[in-house]
Image: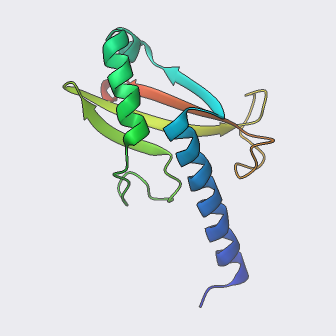
Amino acid sequence: MNTQGEMANADRVTRIRALNDQFRTTLRGGSVVLTAGIVVLGAETQKRIINAVQRFEQFDADNDPWGEHDFGALDVDGEHVFFKLDYYDLERAMHSPDATDPAVTERVLTIMLASEY
């Protein structure tokens, strides 16, 4: 049986996952950062990579141990790509005080080549 704390944490993770999926799939509600390795691939490849990140659904225990859908690894046009979502305060000076609250959180999606990690 779950304790109240475990239930509250599960609700928190569910909320964060929903916000992450919403941002990742729409690219609305945060900022997207492309690393130098992604930029040099050119606009068409960047579009294909971004579209693949938006459609990504292969979350599992290896790439999503906390259940927040905040990381993924995929291959696009022969490139091994990672994406990572981070939660900052609105000034992006420090971590968000509450990643479940869009009013105090700036989501940042970084897309990079695996070799840049």
Quick one: 117 or 106, which is closer to the camera?
Answer: 106
**Residue 84 image offset from top left, x and y in percent:** 48, 37
| For residue 49, side relative to residue 34 (left or right) | left
Q: For the view shown, which residue lies furthest in the bottom direction?
A: 1
Is residue 23 depicted above or below 17 in this figure? above
Q: Is residue 65 left or right of residue 16?
A: left
* Residue 28, image x, y percentages: 62, 33
Instruction: Using residue 32 as the reference point, say whether residue 73 is left or right of it.
Output: left
In the rendered view, tell whether residue 36 sits above or below residue 108.
above
The answer to whether residue 117 of the structure is visible from this angle is: no
Location of the N terminus (image quadrant): bottom right
**50 or 38: which is nearer to us?**
50
19 horizontally vs 48: left or right? right
Residue at 37%, 60% in the rendered image = 61
- How many numbered tags mark residues here? 0
Give the percent coordinates (x, y) of residue 88.
Answer: 70, 36
Mark yes or no: residue 16 visible.
yes
Task: Work out which quarter of the rendered image holds the C terminus and state it.
Answer: top left
Report the residue at 44% width, 58% height from top.
65
Displayed quadrant of residue 77: top left
Q: In the image, what residue occupies the spot 54% across and 36% down?
A: 26
Q: Quadrant of residue 102?
A: top right
Instruction: In the displayed orientation, state which residue is furthest to the left.
Output: 78
Residue 90 coordinates in the image, percent (x, y): 78, 32
